[in-house]
Amino acid sequence: KWATSRPNSMVVTIAPIPDVRFMGGMNGRVPRVCQHLNPASLVDEEAVTTILLNPNARETLSESKFLRLEIGTAPNNWTYQTKIADYLWFSSMPKVNMLPRMMNEQ
């Protein structure tokens, strides 16, 4: 409630990976709750940024050794496609064979 009355505020939440990945947790609920508390709220899915810390393939629901970066990638599912998170953060360089594509080198 505090943040809904302060449009320039920032709310930071720390949660386990299953509660953040694929918009299935609090990152999907935050916009709904904000809209419920204040129908004029500008908070939508684009206003929520997710960062997974040190994810592994199993935590991203992958059945291989690669991280699964999105779900719904078949042509008939594109309208439902969602990314695992906005950012992946690793404490140290991950194994290259864990990433399905190259990281941004910048």
Image: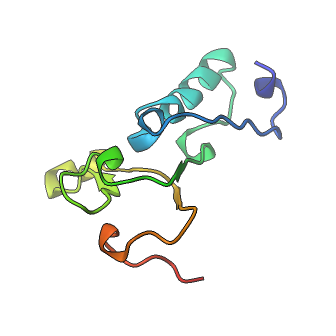
x, y percentage for residue 44? Answer: 58, 38
Point 34% across, 48% down: residue: 60
The N terminus: image quadrant: top right
x, y percentage for residue 38? Answer: 69, 20
x, y percentage for residue 84? Answer: 40, 50
x, y percentage for residue 73? Answer: 22, 56
Horizontal arrangement in the rendering, residue 77 relative to residue 94 (left or right): left
Q: Is residue 62 above or below residue 104?
A: above
Point 78% across, 28% down: residue: 3
Horizontal arrangement in the rendering, residue 93 relative to residue 75 (left or right): right
The residue lying toward the viewer, choosing from 93 and 61, is 93
Q: Is residue 8 above or below residue 67?
A: above
The residue lying toward the viewer, choosing from 65 and 14, is 65
Point 30% across, 56% down: residue: 68
Q: Is residue 87 above or below residue 92?
A: above
Horizontal arrangement in the rendering, residue 40 relative to residue 79 (left or right): right
Residue 100's quadrant in the figure? bottom left
Residue 18's quadrant in the figure? top left
